[in-house]
Image: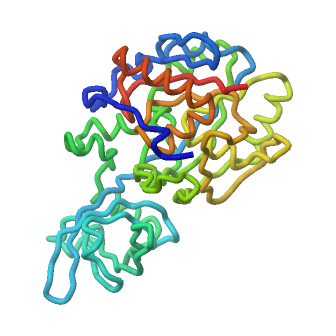
Amino acid sequence: MQLADFAFDLPEDRIALRPVHPRDSARLLVVTPGAALSDRQVSDLSGLLRAGDVLVLNDTRVIPARLKGVRHRQENRTAVEATLHRRLSASVWTAFMRPGKRLAPGDRVSFGETKDRACLLGALDATVREKGEGGEVTLAFDLAGPALDAAVAERGAMPLPPYIAVKRGEDERDLTDYQTVYAREDGSVAAPTAGLHFTPELFAKLEAARIGTAFVTLHVGAGTFLPVKTENLAEHRMHAEWGEVSAETAAKLNAVRAAGGRIVCVGTTSLRLLESATGEDGVIGDFHGETAIFITPGYRFRAADALVSNFHLPKSTLFMLVSAFAGLETMRAAYAHAIANGYRFYSYGDASLIWRAA
């Protein structure tokens, strides 16, 4: 397929810069292939599913992964900004950096305020180890493990998506708004945004309706925001992200399916991870490692029956995924309806409940 197949016009005023409160008051567009669209609210979710179904949620936690610093090369100083992407070891991260062309292996970069060099957390310094073909820079930090984590937490900022960051800076509200209420595993540089709509009150309603929950972990990398640059989708390569499906979670989900329950993934991150963990026979296995799965129309889904997802960018890999899930024409019609009826798009926007095409 071609990139142009996934283009659509989106008015600027449809891009949400703040979430609604309470979170579960966001609008929910129910998309069922072959049936009429239905306008609901996220708080209605317990009534749209049935007893025995299970929601699969990504419990990753967003770290303050955007760092401002200064590149040192002999006597030259250049301001730079890094968005951490993927952790390679206790002291090494890949990152997307601006201006990337100004960096070279061996350069030293000092991040954050460095006036008080007596404070260990003030010494957030790194060496550029290498530059990758995909625009990534490998940074070897002087600190490692918990000390590095603490320094990043002190010096970093919440990495808001580019389409929000160009319109406003991050603030204290984003520290909670851009984090799911169930986040517990540090490692993402972008939120699994479908999960931002969930509240303790909604979880209580789901439990009362005997709808289960299961948790997986996929650490979302900054590559999720990169545009597709190839017109022929077969030439596009996804950035790898680390994920985990425990043996206990896999067994639970297989038991749910065997009992006639349906698996509902909350977010494209949960869906991609679950599909990576599922064999051709439809059996979900435990999974620990990296996935770079790229889902486009024609893909045969093995694990998920439904998907809760926000509304995505034109020509994005995420719009390609939902189009593969429900059908391209179905999703074009759903997005046209959402735009015409004032739905809010992207990370802080409204949601959809999408049922898989037969």
Q: Quadrant of the C terminus?
A: top right
Question: Which quarter of the rendered picture does the N terminus lie within?
Answer: top right
Q: Is residue 22 left or right of residue 70?
A: right
- Write down the quadrant of residue 59 in the picture: top right
From this view, report whether residue 198 is shown above or below residue 75: above
Q: Position of residue 68 (x, y in %)?
A: 23, 62
Where residue 22 appears, as percent x and y from the top left, is 38, 19
Q: Position of residue 317 (x, y in %)?
A: 50, 45
Q: Residue at x 43, y 56 (%)?
A: 229
Residue ID at (44%, 35%): 312
Q: Relative to residue 113, is residue 254 drawn left or right?
A: right
Q: Reply above or below: 42 against 256.
A: above
Percent across and percent down for residue 202 are 52, 19
Q: Is residue 43 visible?
A: yes
Quadrant in which residue 304 is drawn: top right
Instruction: Name the residue nearer the viewer: 309 or 150.
Output: 309
Q: Is residue 237 above or below residue 58?
A: below
- Residue pushed farthest bottom? 74
Residue 242, quarter of picture: bottom right
How many numbered tags mark residues here?
A: 0
Viewer can see residue 199: no
Q: Residue at x 68, y 57 (%)?
A: 288
Q: Residue at image x 45%, y 36%?
A: 193
